[in-house]
Image (cartoon, grey):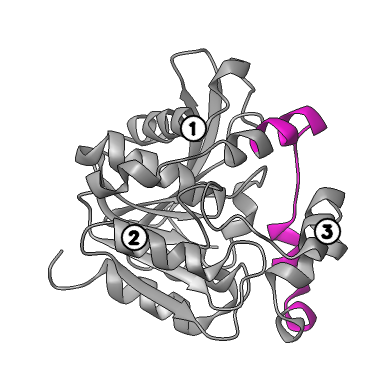
Amino acid sequence: MTTHHREGFAPTDDGAEVSWTSHGEGPALLLLSGQGSTHRGWLHVVPTLAERHRVVLYDHRGVGRSTMGDRGRYTTRSFALDALAVLDAVGVERADVYGHSMGGRVAQWLAIDHPGRVDRLVLASTTGGDRLYAERDPAANRALASGDAGRMAPFFFTEPFRGSFPDVVDDFFARDSSISVRRAHFEASRGHDAWDDLQRIAAPTLVLHGADDPVTQAASARELAQRIPHAELQLIPGQLHCPHLESAAAQDLVEAFLHADTK
């Protein structure tokens, strides 16, 4: 994939071991996956990102090679402590942070509670919590509840992309966790509510969202950008829940944001 590959485990204060991997050299970029997803979901964009960053990926606790730890630690705010443990394990004091879906919820707490560890923040296809803008297409709810990748994929990727890049879709929907862990991740994501704390985010922030996302409403992205000081909002036309993987325009926007002159 790229040179300068490293991997290891990050110990947490409750005894969990979080599996991480990194690719490339340069300023650190921490990628946070969505609910119950493995780091494989990011692999499609890692080679490009690793040309200018040390890209750090990890599996959430209970997923992939990461162990479960304390079941009381399955909240998005606690997951942010796992992200800190990963940064400590790889020897990174500050990083750009890029979270998708539930990973974006975790990234919010990382930036709110630990501002000294976050340089720039990218929040993709995410929300401050289901308290606002939680309405969703019932068909999408049924597909998500099924856990079946074939049923879920049309809500995440457009048909042309699914036809051209089935391997990317397969990697994104790769699941390597028990049903109980997936349920715990679902509850953690559903319980997230950072709306009233978003004004505490000091990091420059890009809010990236598919304009036609049926999983998380675009209205939620608009609200995120309004509540986070000086946040930039980019709605990607024609995109669903995974513009960060599907859209070249979205990927260019992320790179431009991460390398803006004001950094």
Q: Position of residue 23 (x, y in %)?
A: 45, 54
Q: Is residue 91 above or below residue 220?
A: above
Q: Quadrant of the N terminus?
A: bottom right
Is 20 magenta? The answer is no
Give the residue drawn at x 40%, y 76%. 234
Left or right relative to 145: residue 48: left
Left or right relative to 114: residue 166: right
Give the residue drawn at x 77%, y 67%. 153
Q: Is residue 64 visible?
A: no
Q: Amino acid at mark 1?
A: Phe
Q: Nearer the viewer, residue 77 or 254?
A: 77
Crowdedness near tag 1: few (<14), some (14–19) or many (≥20) residues, C-alpha within 10 Å: many
The numbered mark at residue 53 is 2
Q: Amino acid at mark 3?
A: Ala
Q: CA distance from mark 3 to mark 2?
A: 35 Å
Q: Main secondary structure of the magenta part?
A: helix
Q: Circle 3 sits on which residue?
A: 143
Q: Secondary structure at mark 2?
A: loop
Q: Which residues are magenta?
A: 162-185
Q: Which of marks 2 and 1 precedes in the sequence?
A: 2
The numbered mark at residue 213 is none
Q: Nearer the viewer, residue 186 or 179?
A: 186
Instruction: Choose mark 1 or mark 3, whichever is in front.
Output: 3
Give the residue drawn at x 58%, y 26%. 74
Q: To which quarter of the image does residue 222 belong?
A: bottom left
Q: CA distance from mark 1 to mark 3?
A: 26 Å
Instruction: Choose mark 3 or mark 2, whichever is in front.
Output: 3
The numbered mark at residue 79 is 1
